[in-house]
Amino acid sequence: MIEYNVHYYWRIYMARKIVIIGAHAAGTDAASAARKTDRTAEITMITDQKVAGYSPCGIPFVIGRHIKSFDDLIVFPPSYYRMMKIDLRLETKAKKINTEEKTVEI
């Protein structure tokens, strides 16, 4: 009798789905780490902001003119997310999170 490891085959054929809510520096780092860990994962980042991948801690420095512009706070351009195959959803709110069903309503 041959026994199969169902979990092993499931991992090969079923891509893991990862949703990250928040796309500031920490969210972008989480998405990058997830991509490095699992190259086949479907990674979606959701943010209600107009831009992603910046550090909000730097905003006072822009206001105080220690940093020239807000654009200088953006660590990762939109092309980075395309290259890393991360589905970036800007200006999108997570309305409901169901941890039991593992779903996010946007």
Image (cartoon, rainbow, N blue to C red):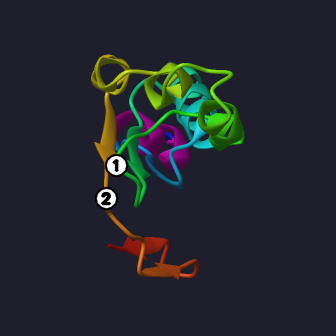
Query: Which secondary structure class fits the magenta region best?
Result: helix
Q: Residue at x 30, y 41 (%)?
A: 87
Q: Nearer the viewer, residue 5 or 20?
A: 20
Q: Residue at x 33, y 42 (%)?
A: 88
Q: Count the labels in the image.
A: 2
Q: Is residue 69 magenta?
A: no
Neighbour tally class for label 1: few under 14, some 14-19, many 20 plus, Cα within 10 Å: few
Give residue 29's position: percent from left, percent from top: 62, 31
* Callout 1 secondary element: loop
Q: Which residues make up the magenta segment? A: 3-13
Quadrant of residue 51 in the image?
Answer: top left
Per the image, the residue denoted by label 2 is 91
Q: Position of residue 8 (x, y in %)?
A: 52, 38
Q: Amino acid at mark 1?
A: Lys
Going from N to C along the chain, the mark reached first, 1 or 2, is 1
In this rendering, position of residue 57 left or right of residue 12:
right
**Where does the C terminus fall, quadrant-wise?**
bottom left
* Callout 2 amino acid: Glu
Residue that label 1 marks: 50
Q: Is residue 55 left or right of residue 93?
A: right
The extreme front residue here reads 64
Q: Answer whether labels 1 and 2 touch (C-beta < 8 Å).
A: yes
Cα–Cα gap, marks 1 and 2: 6 Å
Q: Residue at x 44, y 25 (%)?
A: 71
SS assignment at label 2: loop
Is residue 64 rendered to the left or right of residue 103? right
8 and 80: which is toward the camera: 80
What is the x, y in percent for residue 55? 63, 35
Residue 104: percent from left, percent from top: 42, 72
Q: Does 34 sit left or right of 60 as displayed?
A: left
> In this picture, is 18 found above or below 38?
below
